[in-house]
Amino acid sequence: MSKKFNVIQVGLGPMGKLITNLLLKRKNINLIGAVDINPQLVGKHLIEVLDVDDKSEIVIQSNLESVFSQEKVDVVIIATSSSLEKVAPTIKQAVKSGSNVISICEELSYPFQNYPILSKELDQIAKTHNVSIVGTGINPGYLMDLLPIAITAPCQEIKLIKVTRMMNSAKRREPFQRKIGTGLTIEEFHQKLSQKEITGHVGLTQSIQMIVAALGLEYDELIEFPPKEVITEKEFTTSYDEQVKKGYVCGLQSKAVAKNKGKDIIFLDFIAYAGKHEEFDSIEIEGIPNIHQKIIGGVHGDIGTAAMVVNLIPKIMHAKPGLLTMKDLPVPCYTKNLWKNSD
Ligand SMILES: NC(=O)c1ccc[n+]([C@@H]2O[C@H](COP(=O)([O-])OP(=O)(O)OC[C@H]3O[C@@H](n4cnc5c(N)ncnc54)[C@H](OP(=O)(O)O)[C@@H]3O)[C@@H](O)[C@H]2O)c1
């Protein structure tokens, strides 16, 4: 008989809900619990919160401890924060209970340089408990790091890797639109960024660090530039019913570059703002041969992130133990038809 993967979901914000919806749809997954600290969610039936037609009787708990039962948990999914320091206690708790961890925490996607001590600690506890920890998502985790890494495979030489994401942020979830400054004045945008009230996009530095590590590239400088606001030329209403006046912020552009001896070797350009404009994900390799791959229309970041997480469940079960990144896992792909006892 085909065996299912036992999974717990931690974090039921817009991303956690998208992930949980997909978990419930997948026949190869057995969702055994859901956790969130938000008092408005704790104690409610999961299906009430998700608004789905499912027979699940899961009640949302305020901590992981109360969900770990006699059943072995294969994977704990964490969708709570971009900050590794904030997510680390939940990761440790899951690992110490013998579960693998998949998180969309951006700082976990390549944590070794920014958090060397914490990374070592996480790696050690994962190895002790014979499980794996990985940070994933669409970006960081795929479009601006893993995919460019894979696209270099037929190259004899590489001079420059340039990745551009251009998206209409109006199609994304509310917290995303807010964290890129939608609806703020220019002054508020810069003030909130400097006071860390909004984060902008997190992950360009981690994506560059993953690419250079995978390709063994030498670099002497990595610069992530401060985000630059994009201003709307016409008034519009957001998906959460807020008016944004002409002249206010409707999104941002974030860039990062790795240089070696004064020359760019990796250049990442992330542009997200509300409005009808071309959307795409593009990877250009300057080398032998030159390669230009363009995903017309782009990949929807929220839908794609939920799928990345759920598709990774069978993959992490076959990964080596420790703190891993996307470049270390078996080739990621659509895994709806893979079971716990599949080869
Ligand atoms: N890697 C990628 O490509 C990618 C893609 C999409 C999103 N993300 C990241 O994923 C995270 C989740 O996104 P979101 O939009 O759903 O965020 P969100 O709106 O902030 O939702 C997070 C939820 O988790 C809860 N929470 C916080 N700390 C918790 C803890 N220790 N234990 C249990 N629950 C906890 C929050 O409760 P409270 O509201 O009470 O704090 C909230 O309900 C964000 O940091 C986002 O940047 C990454």
Image: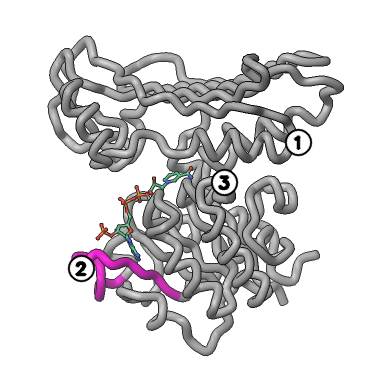
- Is residue 236 covered in magenta? no
- Where residue 42 sits, quadrant-wise, is bottom left
Q: In the rendered image, which residue does mark 3 sit on? A: 113
Q: Which residue is mark 2?
A: 39
Distance, label 3 to label 1, CA atoms, is 15 Å
- Crowd band around label 3 with a 10 angstrom C-alpha radius: few (<14), some (14–19), many (20+): few
Q: Residue at x 23, y 22 (%)?
A: 249
x, y percentage for residue 229?
Answer: 30, 20
The residues tagged by marks 2 and 3 sit, at their Cα atoms, a distance apart of 35 Å
Q: Is residue 178 visible?
A: yes
Query: Looking at the image, is mark 3 or mark 1 earlier in the sequence?
Result: 3
Question: With respect to residue 184, does 245 lie above or below?
Answer: above
Quadrant of the image for the N terminus? bottom right
Q: Indicate whether 191 appears above or below 28.
A: above
Which three-letter amino acid code belongs to the residue tagged 3?
Answer: Gln
Identify the residue shown where x is 50% and y is 22%. 269
Sooner in the amino-acid sequence: mark 2 or mark 3? 2
Give above or below for 278 relative to 194: above
Secondary structure beneath dot 1 equals: loop
Res. 17 visible in picture: no
Label 2 residue near ligand 1, CB within 8 Å: yes
